[in-house]
Image (cartoon, rainbow, N blue to C red):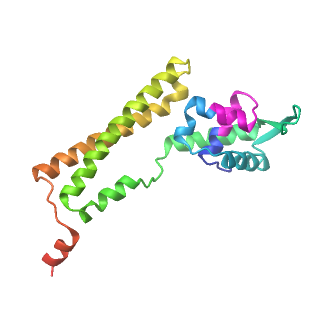
Amino acid sequence: MQSVNSLGLAVLRLLCEQPQHPYEMRQRMGDHGIDVLIKVTRGALYHTFDVLTKAGLIELVETTREGKRPERTVYAITDAGREVAQERVRELLAKPAPEYPSYAVALAFMSLLPKEHALGRLELRCVLLEAELASCTVAYEGLLKRGLPALSVVEWRHKQAHLRADLELTNALIDEIRSGAMEWSLPQDDWKSNR
């Protein structure tokens, strides 16, 4: 069975609700906050519709034109599309996938910086994380107040949990560096001492 990427899965999910035009779907992705979780550009969305159509996962159901406006093509999900979407969700829920977050890379190499510089950057990160967490919380609560079911916006809780964990770790690192519990040496210092 073929697999789909995150944007393809989002398209299939929204087509499960009703047939839609790509432009309408892009608006719905914004309304549901999907565009915050998945990068959605106009070009990528239309390309995804083409790929899913060629794969037989969605099908064209109607083409209309109003006045001089461009044609409006409406798509619906196929039975095969529904099966692929369900299988992909089962896979994503069950198997942790390797992710390569840039913050982990920065942490791995933060010893390249003098201690004070690293502390300053970590402190700034905490400020930015707190702001992002507050914004995420407001967005999540707003989606619920607009009547979206909690199940359809549960990914916002996931994002909040990640932000809280990131903030907790970053604050702990700041405390450990300040207290001296985490020894600090620049890579060239390590090299010199091992000669």
Quarter of the image where the C terminus is located? bottom left
Q: Residue at x 23, y 57 (%)?
A: 117
Answer left or right for 175 relative to 126: left
Q: Residue at x 38, y 39 (%)?
A: 162
In front here: 30 or 95?
Answer: 30
Give the residues drawn in magenta, as a range.
11-28
In front here: 153 or 88?
Answer: 153
Q: Per the image, is 149 magenta?
A: no
Above/below status of 101 relative to 72:
below
Answer left or right for 180 relative to 96: left
Q: Residue at x 37, y 39 (%)?
A: 163
Counting every numbered tag in the picture gives: 0
In front here: 115 or 75?
Answer: 115
Q: Position of residue 55 (x, y in %)?
A: 76, 49
Q: Position of residue 23 (x, y in %)?
A: 72, 37
Q: Residue at x 29, y 42 (%)?
A: 126
Q: Main secondary structure of the magenta part?
A: helix
Answer left or right for 67 relative to 148: right
Q: Position of residue 88 (x, y in %)?
A: 60, 43
Q: Position of residue 119 (x, y in %)?
A: 22, 52
The residue at the far front in this view is 68
Residue 152: quadrant of the picture: top right
Above/below status of 172 relative to 33:
below
